[in-house]
Image: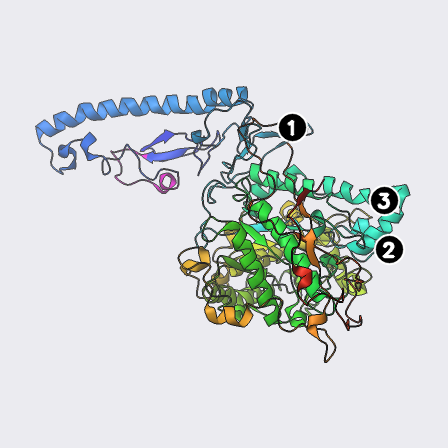
C-alpha cells in the first residue's frame, strides 16, 4: 500500500490524463485539512474537487467560513461533517471496487483487455470495438498478441466498424487525433521510420551485403531482379512485410513519442519503364503503417523522399550520383513528374479519412539548393504551394501543412520565405556526423558527453538559438531528422564501400555491447540536449536492422536500441531545461505565430513582390546547362496521360456501408492529366543527363515551346492496382 498523509482521503481513479494502475492512489484533500486541490489532483483531467468548500461554499453554509462559529453554526456543521464522512467512507470503498473489479470485468468481457484503460466514455458502446491502455493485450491481424506498455496515459483503439476512428491518444499531454494540434503549444516528439520504404544501406545492411555491388536502391533493385533464384524483387516486399511491425508502432507511442515521420518513394505511385524500382507494391504497406499510427494515436509527417532524376544525388533519393531535378538538360522534365506525384499524394491525404492522421506533407527531402539554386527552388515551392492549396482550399483545417527542407542553407536563409503563404513548415536536419567531427573525443569515459561535456553543450549552443529565431523569422520550424551520431561511424553510414565508417577508430561505436554505464549516461545527456535545443523534432531513426553477423553496426542511430539498452530517455519530457542546466541559454519562442503561418487571416495571399519575383514557372534559368544554351528548347513532357490515382485500403471484414473510404482523390474538379513523353520524341536518360547534349530544335518540330504541357484530350483517371 502506498503511504499517505493521515488527513487525506483515498480515492482510486483512472482518467485520460493520469491513468492509475491498481497500486496507485490519487490523494484528495478533505474539507477539514485544506481548501486547495493538491498537485496530484490538479494534474488530472479535472482541476477542482467537488469536495472542496472553497469551490462549493453553498454545500457547507456560511458558518463554516467563520473563524469563530456560533453554537448554532457548530450544531449545523457537526451533522454535515458526519454525513460527509460517511459519504467519503462509502466512496473510498465503492470507487476502488468499481474500478478494480466491476470495470475490470466489464473490460475483459468486452475484449478490451485493459485493466486500467484510460479511454474516455465518449467513444460510446460499439460492437466489435476494442481498446486499451497500459498493460492491455493487443491482438494483431495475424492472431499474435503482445502487451501494450504505455505509462504515459496513451490508449489504442481498434474499431472494425469505423476503421477511420480517430479517438486514440498517444499520451496524456498530446491531443487525441480527433482534436486539433496547436503549433507553438503542442510539441513534436517524433521518430522517423527510415529505411522501410526507401531503402538505405546503413539501415538495412543485410540486404546490401547479399549484393556487394549495390550502392543504392536503383542498383540493389537491378541486381535483385536478376536474382530470380532467391526471389528477385520480391525480397523487397518481404522487407516491407517484416522490418516494421505493429508492435514497433505501439512501442513508439509507449516511449512517450507522438509523431512519426514516414519517408516514401515516388514509385509507390508508379515508375517509368527505364526505372528498376518495385512499382506500387509498397503502397498497401504504407497504408498499413498509417492505420497503425491511427490506432495508437500517432500523427504522421508523410515525406516524399525520392524525386525523379534525384534532387540531391544521395543514395536515399533512389539513385546515387547526379542531381537531375531542376538541374541540367532533363531538370524541367523531372520537375514536371515531381509536381505530378506531389499532387497525387496531396489529393489522397487531403481526404477527410486521412487529414487527421497526416497533418504534415514533406514534399521533397533534402533538395541540394547549392546545386539547384535558391531562386529555382523558391519558384518550384511556390508552384507546389499553389497547386496543393488549389486542391485543399486555404486556411486551417484544409489539407496538410506543407513541409520543405532547408536545403542545407541554414535556417536564417529562409527568413520571410513566401510571406503570406498558407501553412508552410521549414524542416532542418542538423547533424554533427557529417561535419567532419572526430572520433577522438574521450567519449568512452563519458567526459565528452556527460553534464558539461562537449557534445551536449555543442548541441545546445549550435542549434537552440537558430531554431527559436526561425519560429519567428520563418514560421513553424522543426528538425525532421537528428541523431546521436556525433561522428560518422557506422556500417555503410556514409555509403557502401566507405572504409572510414568502419575504420579502427570507429570500432567502439560499431558495437554497443562495449559501452559502459558512463558512456550510456553521456549519450543520453547528448540526446536530451539535442531534444531541448530543437524543441520540435524527429529522431533518425527508430530501427537499424542487423548486419549479416546479426549485430547492429550503427547503434548511435537507433532510438529503439537506445531505449532497450539505456541511452535514450524513457520519457522525452526529461529534455526540458537541459540546455539551461548546461549553461546555454537561448531566447525561447513564445509560441505565437503570425496568423497566416498557421492558416489564419491572410493565409494564401503571398506578398505581391515575391509573386512577381518567383511566380513564373518553370524558373527563368536552370542550373547545369552549357553556356549559351537556349532554355526554351529543354525537353519537357506532355500532360496527356491518365492519372495513376492512389487507391484506398481494403478492410477485412468490410465496414458498414455507411462508412466512406474515399476514392483516393479529394478534389473532383482537379482533372488535369499526368505527364508522359511526347510521342515520337527521343529523351536523354532522365537520371544521367548532366552531360547530355542540349537539343537544338523542338520535338515535334511543329510544337511551340509550351505545347507539350497543353491538355488536348478529355481527362481520365485510372486506379493503380
Q: Position of residue 499 (x, y in %)?
A: 81, 64
Give the vertical position of 694 relative to 636 (above or below).
below
Circle 1 Cα neighbour tier, 10 Å, few/some/many (<14 / 14–19 / ≥20)? few
Q: Quadrant of residue 362?
A: bottom right
Q: Which residue is mark 2?
A: 212
Task: Tell me the SS state at disc 2.
Answer: loop
Q: Toward the viewer: 648 or 204? A: 648
Tell me the quarter of the image containing the N terminus: top left
* Residue positioned 44% across, 55% down in the render: 599
| Magenta residue check for 175 | no
Q: Which residue is mark 3?
A: 232
| Left or right, residue 442 beside residue 83 | right
Circle 2 Cα neighbour tier, 10 Å, few/some/many (<14 / 14–19 / ≥20)? few
How far apart in space, not on screen, are marks 1 and 3 (Cα)? 29 Å
Sooner in the amino-acid sequence: mark 2 or mark 1? 2
Q: Marks 2 and 3: CB-CB under 8 Å?
A: no
- The region drawn magenta spans 29-44
Q: Which residue is mark 1?
A: 652
Amino acid at each position: 500500500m502506498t503511504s499517505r498523509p493521515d488527513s487525506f482521503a483515498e480515492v482510486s481513479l483512472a482518467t485520460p490524463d493520469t491513468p492509475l494502475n491498481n497500486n496507485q492512489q490519487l490523494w484528495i484533500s478533505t474539507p477539514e485539512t485544506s481548501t486547495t486541490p493538491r498537485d496530484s489532483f490538479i494534474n488530472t483531467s479535472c482541476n477542482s474537487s467537488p469536495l472542496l468548500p472553497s469551490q462549493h461554499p453553498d454545500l457547507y453554509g456560511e458558518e463554516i467560513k467563520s473563524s469563530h462559529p456560533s453554537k448554532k453554526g457548530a450544531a449545523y456543521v457537526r451533522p454535515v461533517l458526519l454525513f460527509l464522512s460517511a459519504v467519503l467512507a462509502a466512496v473510498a470503498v465503492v470507487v476502488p471496487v468499481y474500478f478494480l473489479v466491476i470495470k475490470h470485468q466489464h473490460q475483459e468481457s468486452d475484449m478490451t483487455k485493459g485493466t486500467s484503460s484510460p479511454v474516455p466514455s465518449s467513444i460510446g458502446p460499439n460492437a466489435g470495438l476494442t481498446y486499451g491502455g497500459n498493460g492491455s493485450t493487443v491482438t494483431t491481424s495475424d492472431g499474435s498478441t503482445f502487451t501494450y506498455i504505455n505509462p504515459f496515459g496513451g490508449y489504442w483503439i481498434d474499431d472494425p466498424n469505423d476503421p477511420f476512428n480517430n479517438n486514440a491518444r498517444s499520451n496524456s499531454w498530446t491531443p487525441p487525433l480527433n482534436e486539433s494540434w496547436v503549433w507553438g503549444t503542442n510539441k513534436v516528439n517524433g521518430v522517423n521510420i527510415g529505411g522501410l520504404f526507401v531503402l538505405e544501406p546503413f539501415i538495412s545492411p543485410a540486404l546490401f551485403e547479399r549484393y556487394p555491388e549495390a550502392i543504392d536502391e536503383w542498383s540493389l533493385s537491378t541486381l535483385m531482379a536478376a536474382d530470380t533464384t532467391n526471389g528477385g524483387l520480391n525480397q523487397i516486399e518481404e522487407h516491407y512485410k517484416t522490418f516494421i511491425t505493429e508492435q514497433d508502432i505501439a512501442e513508439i507511442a509507449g516511449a512517450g513519442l507522438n509523431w512519426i515521420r514516414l519517408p516514401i518513394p515516388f514509385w509507390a505511385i508508379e515508375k517509368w519503364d527505364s526505372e528498376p524500382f518495385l512499382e506500387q507494391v509498397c503502397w498497401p504497406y504504407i497504408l498499413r503503417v498509417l492505420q497503425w499510427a491511427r490506432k495508437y494515436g500517432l500523427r504522421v509527417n508523410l515525406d516524399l523522399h525520392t524525386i525523379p532524376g534525384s534532387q540531391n544525388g544521395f543514395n536515399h533519393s533512389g539513385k546515387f550520383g547526379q542531381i537531375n531535378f531542376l538541374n541540367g538538360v532533363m531538370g524541367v522534365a523531372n520537375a514536371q513528374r515531381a509536381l505530378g506525384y506531389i499532387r497525387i499524394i496531396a489529393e489522397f491525404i487531403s481526404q477527410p479519412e486521412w487529414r487527421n492522421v497526416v497533418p504534415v506533407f514533406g514534399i521533397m527531402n533534402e533538395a541540394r539548393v547549392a546545386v539547384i539554386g535558391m531562386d529555382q527552388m523558391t519558384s518550384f515551392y511556390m508552384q507546389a504551394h499553389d497547386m496543393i492549396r488549389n486542391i485543399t482550399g486555404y486556411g486551417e483545417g484544409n489539407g496538410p501543412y506543407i513541409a520543405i527542407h532547408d536545403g542545407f542553407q541554414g535556417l536564417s536563409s529562409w527568413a520571410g520565405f513566401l510571406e503570406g503563404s498558407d501553412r508552410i513548415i521549414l524542416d532542418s536536419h542538423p547533424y554533427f556526423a557529417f561535419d567532419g567531427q572526430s572520433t577522438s573525443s574521450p567519449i568512452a569515459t563519458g567526459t565528452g558527453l556527460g553534464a558539461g561535456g562537449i557534445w551536449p553543450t555543442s548541441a545546445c549552443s549550435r542549434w537552440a538559438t537558430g531554431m527559436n529565431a526561425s519560429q519567428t523569422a520563418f514560421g513553424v520550424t522543426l528538425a525532421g531528422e537528428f541523431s546521436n551520431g556525433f561522428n560518422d561511424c557506422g556500417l555503410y553510414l556514409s555509403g557502401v564501400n566507405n572504409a572510414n565508417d568502419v575504420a579502427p577508430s570507429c570500432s567502439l561505436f560499431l558495437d554497443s555491447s562495449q559501452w559502459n554505464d558512463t558512456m550510456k549516461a553521456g549519450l543520453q545527456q547528448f540526446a536530451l540536449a539535442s531534444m531541448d535545443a530543437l524543441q520540435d523534432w524527429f529522431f533518425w531513426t527508430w530501427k537499424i536492422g542487423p548486419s549479416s553477423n546479426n549485430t547492429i553496426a550503427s547503434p548511435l542511430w537507433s532510438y529503439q536500441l537506445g531505449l532497450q539498452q539505456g541511452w535514450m530517455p524513457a520519457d522525452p519530457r526529461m529534455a526540458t531545461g537541459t540546455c539551461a542546466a548546461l549553461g546555454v541559454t537561448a531566447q525561447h519562442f513564445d509560441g505565437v505565430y503570425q496568423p497566416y503561418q498557421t492558416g489564419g487571416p491572410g493565409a494564401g495571399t503571398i506578398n505581391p513582390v515575391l509573386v512577381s519575383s518567383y511566380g513564373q514557372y518553370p524558373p527563368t534559368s536552370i542550373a547545369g546547362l552549357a553556356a549559351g544554351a537556349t532554355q526554351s528548347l529543354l525537353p519537357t513532357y506532355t500532360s496527356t496521360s491518365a492519372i495513376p490515382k492512389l487507391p484506398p485500403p481494403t478492410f477485412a471484414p468490410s465496414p458498414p456501408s455507411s462508412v466512406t473510404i474515399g476514392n483516393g482523390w479529394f478534389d473532383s474538379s482537379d482533372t488535369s492529366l499526368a505527364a508522359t513523353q511526347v510521342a515520337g520524341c527521343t529523351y536523354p536518360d532522365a537520371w544521367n543527363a548532366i552531360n547530355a547534349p542540349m537539343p537544338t530544335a523542338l520535338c515535334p518540330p511543329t510544337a511551340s515551346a509550351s505545347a507539350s504541357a497543353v491538355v488536348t484530350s478529355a481527362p481520365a483517371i485510372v486506379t493503380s492496382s
